[in-house]
Image: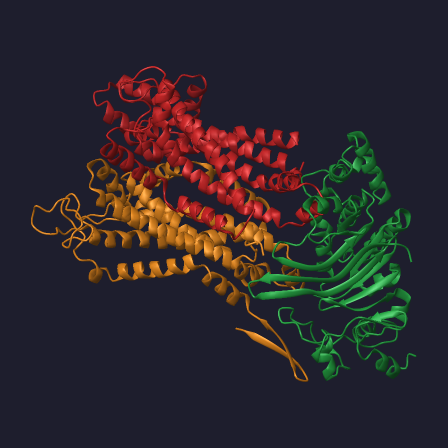
Chain colours: A orange, B green, C red
Amino acid sequence: MFRMHFWIRGSVLTEFVTISPKRMAMRRFLSHKAAVGSCVLLGIMVLAVILSPLTARYGVNESVRKPPNTYLPPQKLAWFGTDDIGRDLYSRLIYGIRVSLVIGFFTALISTVIGCVVGAVAGFRGGRFDDVVMRVTDLFLAFPFLVALLVIRNTIGGIGWLTVIIGDKSSARFIVFLLSFFGWMGVARIVRGQILSLKEREFIEAARAVGATRRYIVRRHLLPNSIGPIMVALSFAVVGAITAESTLAFFGYGPQAGQGATSLGILVGEAKGAVQTGYWWIAVFPCLALVLISLAINFIGDALRDATDPRLDRGE
Amino acid sequence: MSELVLSIRDLRVTFDTPLGALEAVRGVDLDVHAGEMMGVVGESGSGKSVTFLAAMGLLPHQAKVGGSVMLNGQEMLGASNKVLRNMRGGLMSMIFQDPLSALNPVHRIGDQIIEMLKAHQPKMSDKDAAKRAVELLDIVGIPQAAERAHQYPHEFSGGMRQRVVIAIAIANNPKVLIADEPTTALDVTVQAQILEVIERVQKSFGTAVVLITHDLGVIARVADRVNVMYAGRNVEKGGVDSLFDHPSHPYTRGLLASLPHEGIERLTPITGFPPNMLMPPPGCGFAPRCSHATDACLVSLPPLRTFGDLETACIRAEELVVKAGLL
Amino acid sequence: MLRFAFRRIVWAAPTLLLVTFLVYIALRLGTDPLQSYLRANPRATKVKIEQYKSVNGLSSNYVLGYFNWLKNFVTFNWPRSIKGSREVWPELKDASMNTLRLGSLATFFGVAIGLMVGMFAALKPGSRRDVVVNTGAFLGISIPPYITAVLFQLLFAVYWSRWFGHTLFPTSGVYPAGHSGFDLILMLKHLALPTIVVAIQVVAVYSRYMRSSLLDVLNSDFMRTARSKGISERQILFKHGVRNALIPVVTIAALDVGAIIGGLIITENIFAYPGMGVYFLSSFGNGDFPLLMPWMVLVVASTLMFNLIADVSYAFLDPRIRLD
């Protein structure tokens, strides 16, 4: 909170104000109007998605009405039009976004946890472990992403006993696992970088000098001071996961749960076919949704980065 | 007194910040004579660095600068870019506090000096420039100057880098060298060495040096005249011996009293904090902390006036001197 | 410096072997080469099957099998595709040439424009042009390339011809169907849309990089020293500012160039552009091991080579890195 210091001398009041760093960060974040707007937008979206039985107008696999019901343009009956077998695009979009957000969220969560642990250990201990981790992530990150994604997907999906645990290749669970497999590397690099830059600072030296154990230092000093970059990494991990999921689905490798269940990626994938035929709503609404979610999370991540990084970007 | 090389009159610098207008410098008058070592003392936020950054024209465009800065008889404030560029590095140079980051990490040391030489002596041949660069490194005391000129900044220690910075600054024999806290980031033994280099440069080249610092010990050692600044204004000026012997302003006295010396058991700091320059006090900047302040002090800005062999901005200077029994 | 580069080169060869070995394992586990072959050639004789297995190094021992494959690979004894026994090299060559054309064009223009835009923005941070650049870059990064690709297709393939009666930019292939021989204009017309789609992302990414890198540099102490020397604004900006700001950017650019060869899959797929991406997708879909392995080797080699170039150029540009 604010702490105001007064120094009174006669009739003159001299004061200055100190604000805790958390408050400062919060203020800086809130000054990014785009990010605040994005929070609101995402909040509405998440709410709409959580309350999906209420907000969706039809079931995910439900026909809008008796035929003819295919490829209807947007109208009162179906706000975003219907698809090739007469299902309401609006409702499908809600259910699809729900699936994608869940996948994105859990992937990001797992990636961040693993990434933090690995990154902290690598950054703090350095040495062989750090070298190995760096080279491995370097290589993986340098490889064309989609190729690695598809190959690893097949490889892991081909290992019998593994699929028992994490689900079949076309399940959402599998996708979360697959994307986390790649996701943690980016987070680990960010955390490692932050730890490296903090490690040499004097307050760490001081902590060591009073006999703090390594684990204590990491837990109480290094990680709390890395919250900023970690949050930023988390938000970009979410966007990355959602985009990756939709890329997979675009090529038909996405989650294929039965009963017409869908994800945002699948819906965007269906956009590909709609282009030539001129059924623009099949392409526009899912793409718009994906872009908005992407933008929103990116804005938030960007604002978080500005808020937690004391660098003055604005040339003041 | 020798001729005036730098003359600052009523300098005002205000910064446009999101929190409001910050008045960093509020009417500073300063004269620097040829070949003299002028010490400028003040704490952080007193405006001492900003004053000279303004004189060099190195402030960002959010800074509004008013008043007059005459270098060698030419007005610098509002001068054309060409004049300013001529001045910087040619007539007047500035060196800064942190030597570790002052040099471009991807250029060799020798090249960085040559760049300075060529900027103001474009007719100089490459060979001559290279030779001169090595000479300059020698002058500032870099051993094996000829080999080391080919090295990069990260191959030099902090003290060595500061010497290189000085070499660059004096390359074109400027009339004035402004040293902004050149020793603050260095340890004590190196401090003494750097001061010695600066003094040597001053004496051999006749360069006037403005030594900005918060360290009175440094001032006592090398300065000829002293200028004490507080809250964006001068509060006291004079010759170094006079100032140390009979300081007339309570702030200066406070500074001197807070120095550690033999026999004392506890340090005597000046209580309180410097004022917030977003809302500077209407009267004397030091009054809120001054144990001798009266209501008159708090109300109006005291002007700088002659007081014996000093200049002071304290309206109670006479009374306090009598009180302290110094006369 | 040379010692640094030499050491990295020496490490590159075993790394290449190791990575291709891992790829070999991954492909064997993931695409089941034997099954795919049998599926594609249901009436293959036992002799042929054994031949296929030995030439592709598909013995039950993975290590031995890998070396078998490696032996055949380096002696240019490359097995043919499981479908129709096509030769691998001609297809791979065409695909890689196509992709390189598209990728280099897009990367070259994208990086050049991105760097200039980033510099433009960094010089006046917080100003209106900075906001425009930032927002634009943001949009470019947030919108996945396949969406812009699809939208462009929609715009140019469907609507443009509807509105204007002719096709301005074709949206598929390298040449119109049935065309043979080399025609620069046609090739450029077909390259236009995919190049723009890829370049948009590149411009967005590099303008942000350059802006942030240059801003960092402009706020550094040594820039103040440079300004206090009285040298010209241009010298200050380029010799001191940009020179330092480029260091991280160039390194990343080198990595990106290495990634071109396998990195345009989505765009190529949408524009039906017969490059490395389309080659990969169809071979992968068929489980065509003989087609896939050379593709992988090419991509891995390119990635490793440009990783090396990136490291070396970083050391070249930044003397602080040259730890001998």
Outermost residue to the top: C181
Residue C159 is at least partly visible in this image: yes
Q: Position of residue C161 (x, y in %)?
A: 24, 32
Image height check: is B167 above or below A57? above
Residue C58 is at least partly visible in this image: no
Residue at 54% x, 52% y: name it: A121
- Is A31 situated left or right of C218 in this image? left
Image height check: is A225 above or below B287? above
Q: Position of residue B24 (x, y in %)?
A: 67, 64
Hey, which quadrant is residue B48 in on the image? Answer: bottom right
Nearer to the camera, A17 or A122:
A17
Looking at the figure, which quarter contains the N terminus of chain C? top right
Nearer to the camera, C5 or B255:
B255
Image height check: is C265 above or below B327? above
Image height check: is A224 above or below C193? below
Hey, which quadrant is residue A48 in on the image? Answer: bottom left
- Is A242 situated left or right of C119 in this image? left
Q: Position of residue B189 (x, y in %)?
A: 83, 56
Residue at 43% x, 21% y: name it: C73
Q: Position of residue A245 (x, y in %)?
A: 33, 46
Looking at the figure, which quarter contains the C terminus of chain C? top right
